[in-house]
Structure formats: structure tokens, C-alpha cells
Amino acid sequence: MKILVVDDHALVREGLRQVLKGLGTDVDVLEAGSCSRAFELAAEHTDLDLVLLDYHLPDMNGLDALDVFARQHPELPIIMLSGSVNPRVMRQVLNKGAAAFLTKSGMSDELLSVTRLVLAGDVYVPPELMATPAGTAANELQPDQPAPQFTPRQEEVLYLLLDGYANKEISRMLNLSDETVKNHVTAILRGFGVTTRTQAVLAANRHGYTRADTPAAG
């Protein structure tokens, strides 16, 4: 497992590195002190599983950084970290495609729990946001869109996305080339009118696709 931690404070990065080691002995943690360096590392390490991204960075704010990651790595889940609790910012971050929003004042156990949740393909909505009238649930974070029409193969890929599988795993499970799976994922994102896998999962849930419906791959 490979995780990229992006924060301009070395002590924070080191602290997150130590906490993330609690995920298992096979965790490889990369560090970046700026968004520009983070983008370089993401391009170099195409097998990244997750990014922990600070909202306040010297060269770019979190929302703009999410846009870049969405364009360059739409399948890469991102957990946004911030030192402040602001429901409006939380909502913007999740609408931009982040898989979770956590405050730095939280406990290590919470970070590990949310990280496991995101790695499993789920989205974490903070309790502070759940309690606000403008964002009472994850499926209200995006405006409603007409139900897209997918081919049977695209639906197979979609169900596996909902189960949190990466493209390479889907390729192996469905006996498809990596490029074919990538094309199917792109078509799914386009069908839902979104730019990231996280947003596609939210949209799929709104339209009735659930992990419990996942057919056996074969």
C-alpha cells in the first residue's frame, strides 16, 4: 500500500507517517511539502492508493489541488485535512470529489478508521456536515442528474468500482485490458457528469446502485 502525505510542516508529515503505519507493515508513506511536489510524486508513482492533502498549502489551496488531481488522477481517492472546522468548506471539498474531510484536531484512531473506510471505496461525511441543513447526507452533496444509460459491461465495472477495486484488479477480474477498463471508467464518469471515482460512487448510490447488488464477477 502506498500513501502520499501532503503538508508543508515536516512535523505534521512525520506524525501522519507514524499514524499511518498502524494500517499495516506494508504501508509505504511518501511525503510532499507542496502541491507542486505532490503532483510530481503522483506522476512518478502511478500505483498510489491514497492521498492525504492539507487544505492550506503555500502554493495552492485544497480546492484547486483537488481540481488538478481530478484531471490527472481521477481514480485516486483523497482525504482532505484541515486545522479548522468549516461546514461550507467541508461541503465544497466533498463536492470537488474528496473522499473524506478530517480536522487535524481529531484522534489517531479516527484517522485510521476513516482511512480504512476510504481505501475500501467508501466516502466519509463528517458529523459536522451531516448536521447542517445545506448538507444533511452524502447523497445531497451533488445536484440530481438524469439517470445515465450504461452497457452491461460498464455496469459490471461500475459495481466493482462501488466495491472499491482499482483498475488493475478490475482488469484481472473481468479479463479485460487495463486500457479497456480505463475507457469504461471514463465512460462511467462522463455518464454521471462527474470527474472522480468518489463523485461517481455518490452519484451511483443516488441512482440506486449499491454494493449489495454487486454481481459475481466472471
Image (spheres, rainbow, N blue to C red):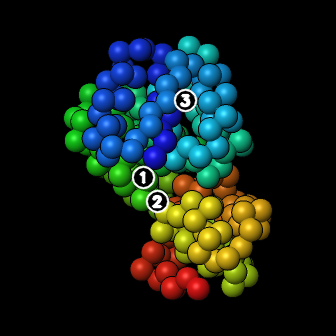
Q: Secondary structure at mark 3?
A: helix
Give above or below for 139 relative to 115: below
Q: Secondary structure at mark 1?
A: helix
Give above or below for 75 relative to 146: above
Q: Nearer the viewer, residue 148 or 79?
A: 79
Residue at left offset 67%, top offset 34%: 44
Residue ID for mark 3: 62
Give above or below for 212 relative to 114: below
Q: Tell me the CA gap for discs 1 and 3.
A: 18 Å
Q: Nearer the viewer, residue 2 or 203?
A: 2
Q: Please say if the residues under marks 2 and 3 sit with CB atoms less than 8 Å apart.
A: no
Residue ID for mark 2: 121
Q: Nearer the viewer, residue 84 or 152?
A: 152
65 on left or right of 16: right
Marks 1 and 3, the one that precedes in the sequence: 3
Residue 205 visible in image: yes
Q: Amino acid at mark 2?
A: Gly
Marks 2 and 3, the one that precedes in the sequence: 3
Residue at left offset 65%, top offset 49%: 74
Q: Tell me the CA gap for discs 2 and 1.
A: 5 Å
Could you say where residue 207 lies in the image, as x and y percent from the top left? 55, 74
The quarter holding residue 170 reads bottom right
1 on left or right of 187: left
Q: Amino acid at mark 3?
A: Gly
Residue ID for mark 1: 118
Q: Please say if the residues under marks 2 and 1 sit with CB atoms less than 8 Å apart.
A: yes
Q: Tell me the CA gap for discs 2 and 3.
A: 21 Å
